[in-house]
Image: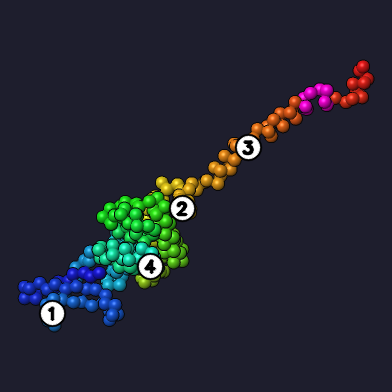
Amino acid sequence: SSSSSSSSTGGTTLMATLDYDQSKDAVVLTADTKIGKGDEIYVTEPVGMSNAELLLTKGYCRSDNPDDFVTVQANVVMADALYTAKKQILDAYNMSEEQTFLVYKDRLPLELLSYLRLSRLQNTDELLKLDFEGDKPISEMNEYEILQLLLTEARMISAGYRTPDTDSDRFVLKDMESSVPAKLAALLRIGEKQVVSSFMDTVRTRLAPIRGIPTKKGMENQNQEILDMFETFESLPSVPGKAIKSFTNWWTDENNWKDPDEDDSNR
């Protein structure tokens, strides 16, 4: 990411960009016009930069930065039987076998969902259902699989922090003895954790309507074993019931339970 800069030299406005150059391991200011010695350069407020980018290039972070994001990696493997067909589709959409997607606090990129749906589909018929232009699931099983992958990814990102919540980070911000670098790091973590939390909530919301789990036979109810148990109970023969009834009748029959000696004495 980069930001614009301007300088006024003899009435001429000079445009420049400020960005981090990974190859040089340095923050570089680049202008399309030569800047003379002593010229004053005004760096404009950057737009669309996450706190990680701001901290790297500007040295500060914003509270509740809407441009904070986390990255999610997705890929298509060559061992896939449909690799060639999938590769052609990705090429058509200017995507590669290994793709990085940005997940923001308020949105899950549709391209990521479509990419994962493509990566997990198993037969050529499903290729025809793929839609990179919209948010259209291929099948319930396919959707369940990709959402579980995303949920696992979100949990792995969250596990990368010492604590998943933001309480300890907010304590650092309030602590008067915290150093400036410590507070900046805390602010950076808070923004990223909020994105991860929203990421998880979004995936769980999409998972909620899916009531089954994938099996070799297809999607099955998650509580199928319990349902099968109740059906088994209901289908049991009525013999046990009859046996209990017979036992009850025997127990209540006075000729069966009275003391024989008592009967003789009453004769």
User: Whole-percent x and y of residue 233?
Assistant: 61, 39
Q: Quadrant of residue 194?
A: bottom left
Vertical arrangement, residue 218 with respect to residue 44, above or below? above
- Please give the residue where the numbered disc 4 appears in the rendered image: 77
Badges 4 and 3: C-beta atoms under 8 Å apart?
Answer: no
Q: Is residue 156 magenta?
A: no
Q: Callout 3: helix, strand or loop?
A: loop
User: Whole-percent x and y of residue 200?
Assistant: 40, 56
Instruction: Of the two numbered discs 2 and 1 on the same chain, state the one appearing first in sequence.
Output: 1
Instruction: Of the two numbered discs 4 and 3 on the same chain, state the one appearing first in sequence.
Output: 4
Vertical arrangement, residue 110 with respect to residue 10, above or below? above
Question: Which numbered circle lies on residue 35?
Answer: 1
User: Whole-percent x and y of residue 99?
Assistant: 32, 66
- Please give the residue where the numbered disc 3 appears in the rendered image: 236
Cα distance in 3D space between marks 1 and 4: 49 Å
Instruction: Of the two numbered discs 1 and 3 on the same chain, state the one appearing first in sequence.
Output: 1
Q: Quadrant of residue 111?
A: bottom left
